Amino acid sequence: MGFDDLLNTGAVPQDERMADFVAESRANRNFCYEAAERAARRVAEDPKAFRRYLDVQSCFLRYTANNALLILEQRPEARRLGDMAYWKERGGFVKRTERARPVLVMEPGKEYKREDNTYGQYYNAKKLYDVSQTTIPEREWQRAPREYEDHQLIRALISRAPVAIHTAGEEGLPEGVGAWFNQEEHSIYARKGMGADEIFRGISRELAHAEYAKGSVEYDRETYGFHAECASYILCRRYGIETEGHYALDSSLLLLEELDSKEIKRELSLIRDAANHIFDRMEKSLTEQTRGQRNTQER
């Protein structure tokens, strides 16, 4: 038997390739919608799943709450995500055996106009891969549990804070509390003599309260107490601050279990957004501190 007949094949027509692409895109979008719904329900019903969600969000603070849910559903152990081009720019490639196992997230597409003349947003599913799925050696991407010194983290935490921060004695704070946001005075009071981790946990929580109070005449501490606690937990996990035994997250069921998936995502977004605002300020400060140290060493 000869092989000539095997070689006489035509090119796949352009419209057929486009049809395949459209079908795959639609399937991926549908997968993302369904996976995010599943993850939202699971997070609302299981405190352990809720804590795992917060851990994922702490690693991917730039990602929306919806995309953190998608990462939780597909690859909760992920540490760094990028598309094929991203990893190629960094000298690595997605392993051939991993190319059919992407992490799908949603990204904004084109705007469209509705019949009532309002505008909506299309969303597209994007294929990402974790660094563990690439050829980049593990030693180059494994992050140390604690990258910064205590004084660097605390300086970054209070840098550019939207409220004043003062130290106070026991008499100036509610009993058993390390830090407290006073909305009327637009200030946070921190108990004197605390250790670095205690300072970080307390002030990060109160900074989250300050974020919720910012520009809101309806701010109520009790309403946002759990959100602030979760935002603080996310920041602690991000920067290697001890969390075990310091955060009672089982009460997530009280906040989420009666909500539908859309409402659950809205509550998760409130948590993520407060943490992300503080994270942005911290990263700018840490970058400046690192640059200043480098310049000092060079001189």
Image: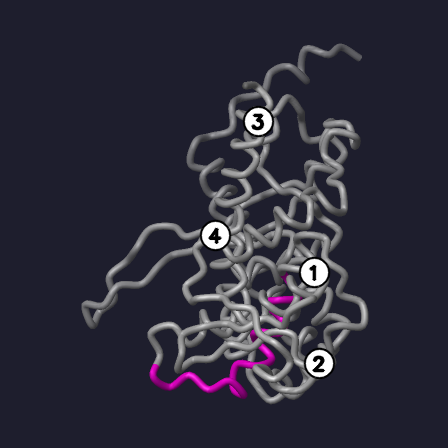
- Residue position marked by numbered label 3 in the rendering: 294
Discs 1, 3 touching: Cβ within 8 Å:
no
Decide whether the magenta segment is chiefly helix, strand or loop.
helix
Instruction: Determine whether, in the image, residue 169 is placed left or right of residue 26.
Output: right
Pointer 1: residues within 10 angstroms few (<14), some, or many (20+)? many
Q: Amino acid at mark 1?
A: Asp
Q: Amino acid at mark 4?
A: Arg
**Local crowd at mark 3 within 10 Å, few (<14), some, or many (≥20)?**
few
Residue toward you, 294 or 147: 294
Tell me where residue 112 sits by quadrant: bottom left
Q: Nearer the viewer, residue 225 or 202?
A: 202
Question: x and y percent of residue 43 in the render?
Answer: 68, 73
User: Are there few (<14), some (14-19), or many (20+) residues within 10 Å of tag 2?
Assistant: some
Q: Quadrant of the C terminus?
A: top right
Label 3 vs 4, first from the N-terminus: 4
Residue type for callout 3: Arg
Q: Which residue does the numbered mark 2 point to in the structure image?
A: 45
* Separation of residues labelled 4 and 1 (CA atoms): 20 Å
Q: Which residue matches tag 1? A: 55
Residue at 65%, 88% (x, y): give it.
254
Q: Is residue 1 above or below residue 21?
A: above
In screen coordinates, is 81 left or right of 166? right
At horizontal 56% and vertical 58% (from top left) the residue drawn is: 67
Circles 3 and 4 in contact, beta carbons < 8 Å: no
- Closer to the N terminus: mark 4 or mark 1? 1
Whichever of callouts 4 and 2 sits on the residue coming sooner in the sequence is: 2
Q: Among all residues in the image, which is located at the extreme left?
A: 117
Residue 122 among those drawn in magenta: no
Marks 4 and 2, Cα distance to the nearest angstrom?
33 Å
